[in-house]
Image: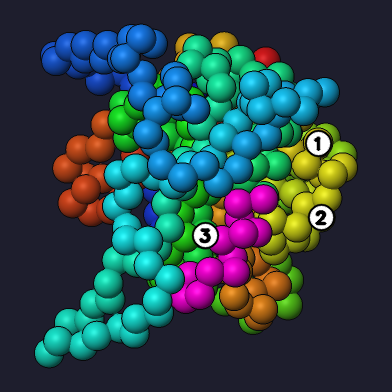
Amino acid sequence: MNKIIEFRKDLVSGDWVLISAQKSKKPMFFTREPTKALPKSKCPFENIVQSEQGKNLLWLPKKGKADAKDWLVRVYENKYPVVITNKTCVPVIKRGLYESTPGNGFQELVIMRDHMKPFGLMDKDEIEIILESYILRYQALRAAPCMEFILILHNSGPRAGASVPHPHSQIFALPIIPPDVANSLEGSRRYFANTKRCVHCDMLKSEMKEKIRIIYQNKSFAVIAPYASKVSYEIRIFPKNHESRFEIIDESRKKDLADAMHVVFRRIYKNLKNPDYNFFIHTAPPKKENEKHYHWHMEILPRLAIWGGLELGAGIDIVKVSPEEAAKILRK
């Protein structure tokens, strides 16, 4: 199974990826030195309450606690945002052939308490409280004028783009729908127009029948290694029932999502030896009511490889470990 060499087409986006397990045998003549993590004593998030990080937007305590000193997660305005926090709506401006709009938006930091506890070492209760912070801030930001999309993401490690090793997520509210999301929405919309069915529901039905790419499941969620994975060990978490919006999940499903994340991140930590990774949540845009065809989900991308010329020049992702083999390893 690990000798699969084939191009696979993503059912939603239409993009092709190359599954080439043979590439893992290619010799490497450069050494990759591990990056030294910032010591805890110099971490800007370690004494976040006393620091001048920015405006505190939300704090949630550990389970069973109520005092601020027992906080588990805090949300702050980002001190160094890549967008401009501006509540004024500005239209797209045309300059000859080109178009632009000011970089307005919101960027927030979701900071976890423990400097030494990544998702792979958290318990279900801790993950559930972090999910609650995501939901509360999403619901607050969706009311902001002119924000077309809200992205919840988490970068872990330097290869994943994290600038601070302390566990933290980010929430962006943007005046545009990002290209990757727009392609996913368009693919879902196109499939629904042709079949009157949800593309992700059909994918899940097929995966649940074949079982070879299923990693884990509980009452509400299924965890799979996608057929046309973009990276080795890519993981997606889908609600089993059709839902277009992440932010409206109830308490029962939130517990089940925390359970699925707990299992998956623990296996990533143990079986893949705690790699750098990104995860993000793709959900229907907050201001669009006609995207009920869409099926929200979480994507987890371990960063085990570096892009080369084919990936960058042709836009074709090369995956060294087949999704079938990845699922087998992550089921353990």
Which residue in the protein does label 3 denote? 150
The magenta stretch spans residue 142: yes
Query: Is 253 above or below relative to 284?
Result: above
> Residue 98 location in percent, x, y?
17, 82
| Vertical arrangement, residue 238 with respect to residue 215, above or below | below
- Provide the residue span drawn in magenta: 136-147
Front in this rendered view, residue 85 or 331: 85
Amino acid at circle 1: Lys
Dot 2 or dot 1: first in sequence order is: 2
User: Mark 3: which amino acid?
Assistant: Ile
Q: Toward which corner of the image does residue 24 lie, by quadrant?
A: top left
Which residue bears the numbered disc 2? Answer: 241
- Percent position of residue 302, x then y: 45, 30
For residue 134, above or below residue 138: above
**Percent from the top left, x then y, of residue 70?**
68, 21
Q: Secondary structure at mark 1?
A: helix
Earlier in the chain: of badge 1 and badge 3, it is 3
